[in-house]
Amino acid sequence: NRRDQDFAGASHLTLMDVLEHQEDDRAFMADLAERMDPGATLLLTVPAMPFLWSDWDTKLGHYRRYTKRSLRRAVDSLPLEIEEQSYIFPELIPAGIARRLRSRRGSQDDAGAEFPELSNSLNETLYRVGRASMRMRHYWPAGTSLFARLRHVD
């Protein structure tokens, strides 16, 4: 039984920007669920909004971006109950759109998949905006990432 491998006794697991790197996300989640104890909680984030797909995603090795519906499909019929789903980082959607437009125009980003260096003031501003937007995450209809909390119900 694989259940006693890896996660035995773990009450919480996290997958932060991991699922989108799995070619078969459903098989990956089925294997993960099999290894979780009943009642354990899984916290995960994935890139959101397929319309934001760009060369950036390809360079990072992503297979997909998610919507709430597509994430539900990845765990449908598994012993994982979605307790919360919310979009996060809506303030970064304009940057995502700009990146997508540059990709469509064929602009090559010499930095590859590296994050751009930001000035301290811009970084601080984005941090403050991000902190405020996280408190409102249950209300956003979109964001560059999707957060989910799932509980193993088997």
Image (spheres, helix red, strand yellow):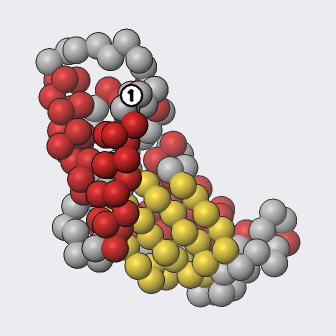
Q: Is residue 89 above or below residue 43?
A: above
* Image x and y of residue 50, in percent: 26, 47
In the picture, the quarter occupied by the C terminus is: bottom right
Place of residue 60 in the rendered image (x, y in percent of width and height, measured from the top left): 46, 32
Residue at the spot 17% in from the left edge and 43% down from the top edge: 94
123 vs 152, left or right, is left
> Where on the picture, by quarter, is residue 30?
bottom right
Q: Quadrant of the N terminus?
A: bottom right
Q: Position of residue 3 (x, y in %)?
A: 79, 72
Residue toward you, 125 or 97: 125
- Up the image or down, 127 lies above or below 106; here it is below
Instruction: Say what amino acid the circle numbered 1 marks.
Output: Pro
- Quickly name the residue at label 1: 116
**Considering depth in this image, is 37 or 115 the residue closer to the camera?**
115
Q: Is residue 27 above or below residue 139?
A: above
Residue visible at 42% across and 19% down in the picture: 112
In the displayed structure, would residue 55 be above or below residue 75? above
Residue at x-position 31% and y-position 49%: 125
Would you say residue 77 is visible in this rendering?
no
| Residue sitting at x 44%, y 70% | 148
Secondary structure under tag 1 reads loop
Number of numbered markers: 1
Residue found at the far front of this picture: 121
Image x and y of residue 76, in percent: 44, 73
Query: In the drawing, does residue 154 fall left or right of residue 80?
Result: right
**How crowded is the residue under tag 1: few (<14 C-alpha within 10 Å), some, or many (20+)?**
few
**Left or right: 35 in relation to 116:** right
Residue 64 visible: yes
